[in-house]
Amino acid sequence: MPTGIVGEFLALKEETDADLLAMQCGDFYEFFGDDAEFVARELDLKVSQKSSHGSSYPMAGVPLSELTPYVKALVERGYSVAVADQYDTDDGGHAREIVRVVTPGTLLETADADAQFLAAVVRPEDGTGSGGSATDAEYGLAFADVTTGQFLVTAVPDLEAADAELYRFDPVEVLPGPNLRSDDAFLDRLRDGLDAKTTLHGAEAFAPGRARHRLREQFGAETLGSVGLDSQAGIAAAGAVLDYVAETGAGVLGSMTRLQAYRPDDHLDLDATTQRNLELTETMHGGKEGSLLSTLDHTVTSPGGRLLREWLTRPRRERAELTRRGDCVEALASEALARERVKDALDGGYDLERLASRTVGGRADATDLLSVKETLETLPAVAEAVEGSRLVDSPLADVVERPDREAARALHDELDDALAPDPPNTVKQGGMFRVGYDDELDDLIERHDAALEWLDTLAEREKRAHGLSHVSVDRNKTDGYYIQVGKSVADGVPEHYREIKTLKNSKRFVTDELEEREREVLRLEEARGDLEYELFCDLRDRVGDRAELLQDVGRTVAEVDALVSLAAHAAANDWVRPELTEPGPLEVEAGRHPVVERTTEFVPNDLRMDEERGFLIVTGPNMSGKSTYMRQAALITLLAQVGSFVPARSATVGLVDGIYTRVGALDELAQGRSTFMVEMQELSNILHSATEDSLVILDEVGRGTATYDGISIAWAATEYLHNEVRAKTLFATHYHELTALADHLPRVHNVHVAADERDGDVTFLRTVEEGPTDRSYGIHVADLAGVPEPVVSRAGDVLAKLRDEKAIEAKGGTGGAGGSNGAGGTKQAVFDLGSGGFQGAAGTDTAASADGGAVDAGNAGDTTDADADDGPAASALDPGTEAVLEELRGTNVNELSPLELMARVQEWQGELDGA
Ligand code: ADP
Ligand code: MG
């Protein structure tokens, strides 16, 4: 083990779990050994060698003042960096200790406007995994943004729901609880799906007792009860987050002023896949451009942008809140002039929540406090724009009334009295305060100014007193203040001048008095710097104490910004305010897709779904617009539950409790985003989670497998959703066969996207009409693609034959309208392809598989047969087993000895095992 500096470095490294350690050595922070080489590679630093007791170690360093950008760059690449500072010991030496660990979730210096969540996820002791079988199993989740002080906690019933919350918040760092650390699938999803750093924080921090204690300490004893946080797992997660923030030494606990506990059912259930499918914050290809958020985001402040993102990813269920937002948007949308005025007022503001955190963390400088002051000015300006217009009659007036405006004004005035108009961005050199702020400081400044004035005018006085030309007084680091005299006149200087330096064309002198004044200036400068620093820290603490007020003002400004953005988009794109019903139909007249309409000449479409018409099967050729039509329905519902206007001529939206989407479309499969297994897991999740009040979008589900499998699954899922779940459902399918379900299941209706076919050309009309498509377009596409004529025409024959034979027949569900819930009234329609041949078709296997093969390369043989009638099973055995049976039949027991028999039985067993 090396000793000396390198030894100290390695010993400190033992103490921390951080990936890298930066250790202060005098005026530098140094990295040693592997860390040095790694950092040098990542950040393009120079590596030198440090020799220590005969060995040599790589070393890379950055000056003290430049540590922050380097640490930030490393952390943004997903590494954690421990920072060890140097301090003086009593015996006059130096020692070092780790003062902070900077991690992706505790980085305060971020320049990114997005929220930066640190999350903890806790599974209870008896967690039974993702099956959801244990009804009371709860997962606790906590989300903290140290840069804004936001702190949210919740508990959800199962792992899928936990995933959905994680996806919504998109944390940069996750602390899995002790029971989740061995769950590889969960950890993989964190890494791949979220791109988050996973940190294993000490298990004891998750212990319920300790976590509860932490929360009480932070938020006060009553908080847990008053915010309704009663979940053990939620408490454990929240406590662990606080513990971690404290331990990493970010110093921002003070900005976490509020614990917000929420119940997942306050918000629309949007699982991770649905959030991705609907391209809420990023597209399927991963870019932000083209997402719903980037389309709608016209905010002018970064807190406004963050809030809009939060609204879109966490739509609401309660009508009251949606009505309130809708009233604001409506008022702003119809008052263009006032809206512009509000927007102008918002524009000058900075990120007040972030500034509050920096202030509490002791990292704000005078320019930051000046930004606080200027942003506090936006609130009265916004309020004035609201109150001086018709907006005053909308709930927007309440929004701007919410923060304590009196207190905000007082804080503003305090800062205004204190800070100089253009303060330096250092905190120790003076120049931060206005005259009149502090008497002692004013006195110092006056004396300082007088001393400077004496120095400034010295050259003039010396010229006059001693008749010298070419005299100047100046100052530099090595010589201090000096009188510089041109060489030509240097011989004429008075006695009391002492020469200190000769230059090419001049000489430098000092005098006793000059030295005395110099000492005074330096003394005053230092005293002024010290006093200003002290005053500044006091001021910063006082502002930090009002973090909650700053956050209130910041969130108000953010909310106004987000509302203005929604209104501006609605006004510019002809959107309407949806009528909300609860529960109720979904009726859209001339609806559009909010993103596609921006780039395409969009053909508007109607949509009607209600009690009698709860399940729409959407057919139409490839590329006709099925997926777009269904996503449009989902997005219009979602936007209505954000409080936004929607892209339509008119819309009535029945509030839903969740939106579920599944895409099995080929384009998805081709991108490797969906395997059949994933598709089925997702389908299973919908069938478990959706309720009568949900909206379900199924896009070509079942496509990832052979035709018969696919049809069977689609068929059965339709029946289940129709009869049992009763969710509003839109199902796009290329299985034309499914359209027959409308004849058998009362709430199922067919619609199709119209296409015009003439002379072998398909023109997409993009309009959605009642009824199924009149033909299957698959064969048509084969024709267009140049498949030889005999094959195309034979495919047509086969298809006709299959249809004639009524290959698929729905059973049940034909009884009276609607009443599938009545006792005994529920008849599941049965789709019987299970035995490998069509019901009613010629009884041989060959007929079915030959026909199947002609329609689709599908393989009838690997069909699942859950519902199959029990047919004769003789031929179902594999050849190996058959052979054993054959031998058994042919064995004469009386001819063989017991030993021979035993040997033979053993052989058979071996063969059967191998079969
Ligand atoms: P499908 O799911 O039927 O294969 P898509 O919904 O993927 O078809 O749509 C195919 C293309 O048609 C997309 O590029 C889309 O932008 C465009 N499109 C869909 N609906 C409309 C519409 N109503 N008006 C204009 N273009 C549309
Ligand atoms: Mg599609």
Image (spheres, helix red, strand yellow):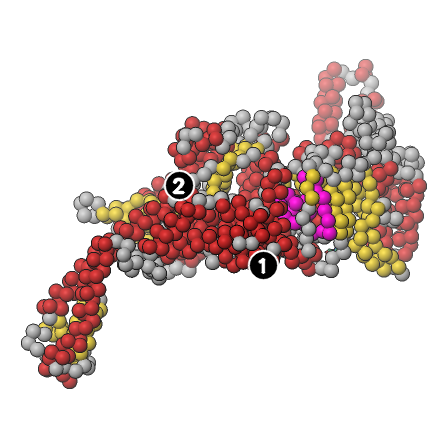
Which residue is tagged 2?
A: 253
Give the alpha-carbon distance from disc 1 to disc 2, as whole Å.
Answer: 42 Å
Q: In the rendered view, does 353 fall on the left or right side of 907?
A: left
Q: Quadrant of the N terminus?
A: top left
Reading the chain from its start, which is encountered first: label 1 or label 2?
Answer: 2
Q: Nearer the viewer, residue 396 or 184?
A: 396
Contact (Cβ within 8 Å) of mark 1 with mark 2: no
Q: In the rendered view, does 125 fall on the left or right side of 807?
A: left
- Tell me the SS state at disc 1: helix
Q: Which mark is residue 337?
A: 1
User: Is residue 606 depicted above or below 829 in this figure?
Assistant: below
Quadrant assignment, res 698: top right
Q: Residue at x 88, y 48 (%)?
A: 774
Range drawn in magenta? 636-655
Residue 52 appears in view: no
- Tell me the SS state at disc 2: helix
Q: How busy is the neighbourhood of tag 2: few (under 14 within 10 Å), some, or many (20 plus)? A: some
Q: Residue at x 54, y 26 (%)?
A: 126
The amino acid type found where label 1 is placed reads Leu
